[in-house]
Image (cartoon, rainbow, N blue to C red):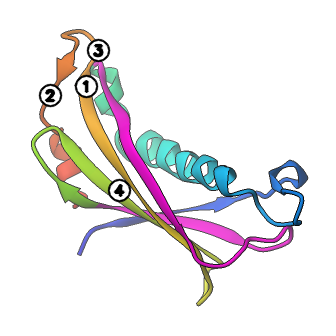
């Protein structure tokens, strides 16, 4: 089973749309917040070696609306690894049984010095 990592999200009034729930585009900001925290906590050495992880694809399945005072946690994990790309899967939830959305991003490892894609570092493979 893949290792999971969870991040609490603080909702802001500006996240809401005209219907009073979190705008669908903002969900991707929540995914990014959790992903950046994951990389800061576990994969810092990857960027220190000039390797960036770029989002090649992002998708989200919206289940139920998030309202302003809801508790939101993003749990993510490495779901698939290839040679130079890997998938992160996400669950946006309330910490209990309520799932607001599920999502996936395909990440590509890119060497900024050599200006080309590179193999996934072992630290990322180890989380799968």
Of pointers 3 and 4, the one earlier in the residue sequence: 4
For label 2, count other residues whose C-alpha is less than 10 Å away and answer few (under 14), some (14-19) or many (20+): some
Residue 126 shows up from this direction: no
Q: Which mark is residue 118?
A: 2
Q: Is residue 78 left or right of residue 104?
A: left
Residue occupying image coordinates x 45% and y 45%? 41
Of pointers 1 and 4, the one earlier in the residue sequence: 4
- Spatial CA distance of label 2 from label 3 is 10 Å
Tag 1 and tag 3, C-beta contact below 8 Å: yes
SS label for mark 3: loop
SS label for mark 2: loop
Of pointers 1 and 2, the one earlier in the residue sequence: 1
- Spatial CA distance of label 1 from label 4 is 16 Å
Q: Is residue 96 left or right of residue 103?
A: right
**What range of the chain is rendered magenta?**
50-78
Of pointers 4 and 2, the one earlier in the residue sequence: 4
- Spatial CA distance of label 3 from label 4 is 21 Å
Main SS category, magenta section: strand
Residue named by callout 4: 88
Quarter the N terminus occupies: bottom left
Residue named by callout 1: 110
Q: Is residue 68 magenta?
A: yes
- Spatial CA distance of label 4 from label 2 is 18 Å
In percent of width and height, residue 117 lies at 18, 25
Residue named by callout 3: 112
Tag 1 and tag 4, C-beta contact below 8 Å: no
Tag 1 and tag 2, C-beta contact below 8 Å: yes
């Amino acid at each position: 089973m893949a290792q999971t990592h969870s991040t609490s999200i603080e909702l802001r009034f500006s996240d809401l749309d005209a219907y009073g729930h979190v705008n669908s585009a903002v969900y991707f900001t929540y995914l990014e917040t959790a992903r950046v925290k994951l990389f800061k906590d576990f994969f810092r050495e990857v960027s220190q070696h000039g390797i960036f992880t770029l989002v090649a694809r992002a998708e989200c399945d919206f289940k139920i609306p998030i309202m302003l005072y809801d508790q939101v946690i993003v749990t993510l994990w490495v779901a698939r690894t290839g040679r130079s790309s890997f998938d992160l899967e996400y669950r946006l939830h309330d910490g209990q049984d309520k799932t607001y959305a599920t999502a996936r991003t395909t990440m590509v490892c890119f060497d900024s010095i050599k200006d080309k894609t590179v193999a996934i570092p072992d630290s990322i493979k180890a989380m799968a």
